[in-house]
Amino acid sequence: MHPKILHTEGEYEEALSHVEILMDAEPGTPAEQELELWTLLIENYEASHHPIPPPYPVEAIRFRMDQMGLKPVDLTPYIKSGRIAKEPASDSHKPKV
């Protein structure tokens, strides 16, 4: 398979299959260079055809709090109101669709 700009979902799927084969390439080999090139082509296709929207701010805060093992009360030193510090843990700020 020769590297080329990916235009269709079929080409994208073929590229993913090809990259799977190249995943065990030894460092410094032509296969590793080919893997890197295909990875860039796939990333380019995904950025334009499968963009990931940014998270809602409250969801991002909840995620980071969970990663760090924080509770809403831990935000109190940074947010003066205890009520506001607890809001990211509640569902009161979910966007309405």
Image (cartoon, grey):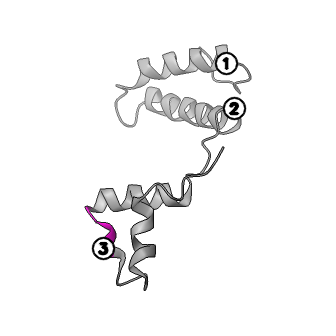
Q: Earlier in the sequence, mark 2 or mark 1?
A: 1
Q: Are marks 2 and 1 in contact (CB under 8 Å)?
A: yes
Locate residue 48 relative to residue 17 in the image: left or right.
right
As shown in the figure, which amino acid type bears the numbered disc 2?
Answer: His
Q: Earlier in the sequence, mark 3 or mark 1?
A: 1
Q: Residue under circle 1?
A: 9
The residue segment tinted magenta is 69-74
Q: Earlier in the sequence, mark 3 or mark 2?
A: 2
Picture coordinates of residue 49, whole percent (x, y): 69, 32
Q: Is residue 63 above or below residue 3?
A: below
Picture coordinates of residue 64, whole percent (x, y): 38, 60
Q: Is residue 15 above or below residue 79?
A: above
Picture coordinates of residue 39, whole percent (x, y): 54, 33
Q: Is residue 60 above or below residue 39?
A: below
- Kindly identify the residue that appears in the image at 62 percent across and 46 percent down: 53
Q: Residue under circle 2?
A: 49
Locate residue 18 relative to residue 26 in the image: left or right.
right
As shown in the figure, which amino acid type bears the numbered disc 3?
Answer: Val
Disc 3 from disc 2: Cα separation: 41 Å
Picture coordinates of residue 41, whole percent (x, y): 62, 32
Q: Is residue 7 magenta?
A: no
Q: Residue under circle 3?
A: 73
